[in-house]
Image: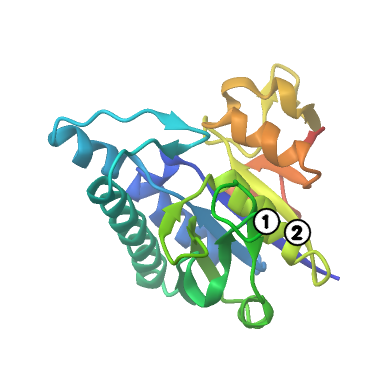
Amino acid sequence: MRDLYIVYLDRYHLGDPLFVKKMAKQITQGTQRDCLIVHGSGEKVERTLEAQGIFPERSKGVLDVENEKQKRLVERAVREANQEIVGSLTDEVVSTVGIQGTDRGLLRIETADGSEAGPNLAVGKTGWLEALLKQHVVGVVSSLARTASGEVREVWTADAVIAIENALDDVFDATVVFLSQAGQAGIIDAKGTKDEVDATSVGDAVAEPDAVRHVVGAGCSAIVTNPEGLWDDPVRATRLAA
């Protein structure tokens, strides 16, 4: 089974254009890997809303917006972030495809009875995505999902990662990659890089520790590293244990 690395692009690193360019260079210079990058809304949309006197909180990584205008602003910001990431990768000659979570019914919000009321996230057919990844195309997926009525909503990137990992489980041996807040190839102490840490004690080693606990708690294999560590041979990282 082929290895796949699903990079959780957190808000901290999403807001740093230099980081994305650095990651792009590592992809071109490092070991070839099947890779998927998943992201949500970053600080850009928060600044846009704040400029209008709106200061929404985040609940499970998603902005609590109150009306259709605000929802459209969030959707636009997520789409623009996707385009910017793809542009940075393409500038470094990385074979890349931008994918909105709504494309081809990839991410859908539904409940057991088909209503929109619940948080359940379903994934549509993934054959087209699998084919892209097997061609060593880097997929950049936004955490936008469509409801049964056609409304577009941002979902927690952690939920999107779990749903996609589960959907690709029969084809790929997937590992979720969380990026080191300190820019290191793993979690490091006085004795060096740790081989493994408990996900519940990851602390500020990553930007969004709640996402780490959620993803690992859902049974996903996960590591903490940086672009140099991910595209090195072998991968240099700290494993995250449940």
Q: Pointer 2: residues within 10 angstroms few (<14), some, or many (20+)?
A: some
Give the distance between the C-alpha atoms of the residues marked 1 and 2, in whole angstroms.
Answer: 5 Å
* Nearest to the observer: residue 101 or residue 110: 110
**Which residue was labeled with disc 2?**
166
Q: Secondary structure at mark 2?
A: helix
Using the image as rendered, state which of residue 31 and residue 174 is in the foreground: 174
Do callouts 1 and 2 mark residues in contact (Cβ within 8 Å)? yes
Location of residue 130 (image quadrant): bottom right
| Residue tagged 1 | 163
Residue drawn at x 59%, y 63% is: 36
Q: Please state the horizontal and vertical placement of residue 64, each as a whole percent of the image.
A: 38, 35
Classify residue 205 as left or right of residue 199. Answer: left
Circle 1 packing at 10 Å, graded few (<14), some (14-19), many (20+), is: many
38 vs 149: above or below = above
Left or right: 141, with 201 as reference point: left
* Corner quadrant of residue 6: bottom right
Quadrant position of the N terminus in the picture = bottom right
In depth, the one of 31 and 62 nearer the eye is 62
Task: Name the outermost residue toward the top.
Answer: 190
Q: Position of residue 90 (x, y in %)?
A: 39, 72
Is 76 on the left-hand or right-hand side of 174? Answer: left
Quadrant where the C terminus is found in the figure: top right
Kind of residue at disc 1:
Ala
Q: Amino acid at mark 2?
A: Asn
Q: Residue at x 66, y 68 (%)?
A: 34
> Where does the image place residue 74, in percent across and percent down from the top left?
32, 49
